[in-house]
Amino acid sequence: MVSDISTALSLLVIGMLTVFVVLTLVVLTGKLLISIVNLLPKETIIPVRVNNQGIENSKIAAITAAVEAFTEGKGNIKKIEKI
């Protein structure tokens, strides 16, 4: 009976260590991938004129300001449609 408990405990420890090692590898790989992607040059955004099909200019300005504030200048409006 003592042998069974020691076998169970050793399997438990080995399993927990395996999970810990795998999760550590996942986290480190994710951090490495993030650093590699951050080293790449950023996309250049070409400003596109928004066609205001019956949308007031003040509303377009408000939408643009909201997108700029929310995305911290990284967002780009491609199309505005009135529904």
Image (cartoon, rainbow, N blue to C red):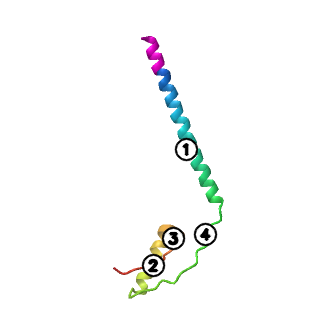
Split into 4 quadrants, where in the image is the C terminus? bottom left
Q: Residues within 10 Å of mark 1 (few under 14, many from 20)?
A: few
Q: Is residue 22 above or below residue 7?
A: below
Residue 5 in the figure: left or right of residue 40: left
Q: Earlier in the sequence, mark 2 or mark 1?
A: 1
Kind of residue at badge 2 = Lys
Residue 7 in the magenta stretch? The answer is yes
Residue 4 % position (x, y): 44, 15
Q: Is residue 66 above or below residue 4?
A: below
Image quadrant holding the N terminus, namely top left
Marks 2/1: CA distance? 38 Å
Whether residue 30 appears in magenta in the rendering, the answer is no
- C-alpha span from label 3 to label 1: 29 Å
**Which residue of the protein is positioned furthest toward the top in this rendering?**
1
Q: Categorize mark 4 by other alpha carbons within 10 Å: few (<14), some (14-19), many (20+).
A: few
- Residue at 47% x, 76% y is 65
Closer to viewer: mark 2 or mark 3: 2
Q: Secondary structure at mark 3?
A: loop
Q: Position of residue 31 (x, y in %)?
A: 59, 49
User: Is 60 placed above or below 9 here?
Assistant: below
Task: Return the residue at label 1.
Answer: 26
State the residue in front, 18 or 52: 18
Residue 43: give its label.
4
Tell me the residue at 55%/44% (across/down).
26
Q: Is 14 situated above or below 6?
A: below
The label number, if any, that marks residue 75 in the structure image: 3
Q: Earlier in the sequence, mark 2 or mark 4?
A: 4
Residues rendered magenta in the picture: 1-8
